[in-house]
Image: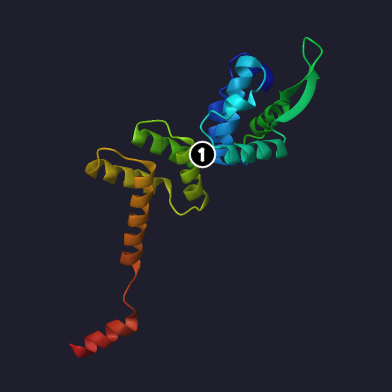
Amino acid sequence: MIKKLFYGGYFDYSKFISNNINTLSLTIVDAFVLTKILDFYKETNHIDIKKLGLCGVDKKNLDKSLANLIDRKFINFYLENDENGLACEAVSLDGFFERVAYIINNETYEDNDAYMIVNIVQEGLNKPLTAKDLELLTSVINENRFKREDFENALEKLKQTRRVITVKSLLIELENEKTGIIKEEKETPSFVKDFVSQLK
C-alpha cells in the first residue's frame, strides 16, 4: 500500500521521516541521506551513488549512513540483469516501506523535538541547512543539553544583535546562555551566609 502511494506521488516521505526520526532510529544525517535516496529512486527507479555523493554529505558520513540504512534493512542492494543482459546494481526500498506501514498501523507518530529544532534553526537562518550544519546540530541534539525553547530564545537574541546568523554563532550563544544560567543557579552555601550574617 505505502509503495503504491509512493509511486503515485501521494506519500510525503520527507515529512514522514522527519516526524518519525527517533522511531526509525536514524540520525539527522541518516534521515537526510534516506530522503535523497527516495528522491532519486522516485525519479529513476535506481540510485546513482556518485550522484548521491554530491548531495553535500562527506564520503565518511555518507558511507556511515548507508551502512546504517542497510543494517536496519531500509535499503537493500542486489544485482540484476539490464536490457542487454549485463549485471548491474539495483536497490530495493521494500524494507523501508514495510517499516512505514508498521509505524502507521501501530500509530507511533511522535512530536519530534529534533525535527522541530532543525525547522526552527532553518527558519531562523532563513536558508537551507548544509550537511555540516546538520552534523553540528545532530551532535548537540543527541547530547540532549538544550531544549527546543533554548534554540528559540537564542535565535531571538541573535536576531537583535546580528545581521547574519550561522549555526556556529547559534551554538556559541547557546553555550553562553547555558554558562550564564549555571552561574545564576549557584547559590551561596548556607554556612557562608551564616558566617557573613555574624560579621554584620
**Residue at the top extreme, as displayed:** 83
Residue 63 appears in view: yes
The residue furthest bottom is 198
Q: Position of residue 165 (x, y in %)?
A: 31, 40
Residue at the left extreme, as displayed: 200
The residue tagged 1 is: 111
Badge 1: few (under 14), some or many (20 or more) residues near its Cα, within 10 Å? Answer: few
Residue 9 location (% of width, % of height): 58, 15
Q: Is residue 117 or residue 193 the one in the foreground?
A: 117
Residue 24 visible (yes or no) = no
Res 76 → quadrant: top right
Hey, what amino acid is under mark 1?
Answer: Asp
Residue 30 in the image: state x and y as whole percent: 59, 37
Which residue appears at 61% of the width and 24% of the height?
Answer: 38
Tell me the element at label 1. Answer: loop
Position of the N terminus by quadrant: top right
Horizontally, residue 63 falls left or right of residue 18, namely: right
Is 173 located above or below residue 72 in the figure?
A: below
Where, by quadrant of the figure, is residue 133 drawn? Answer: top left
Q: Residue 131, percent across and down?
A: 49, 36
Picture residue at 66% right of the left edge, 35% below the top: 106
Q: How is the image coloured?
A: rainbow
- Classify the position of the C terminus by image quarter: bottom left
Compared across the picture, whether 161 is left or right of 172 comes to left
Of residues 145 and 173, the one nearer the viewer is: 173
Name the residue at 57% across, 42% down: 27
Along the line of sight, the residue nearer the viewer: 52 or 180: 52
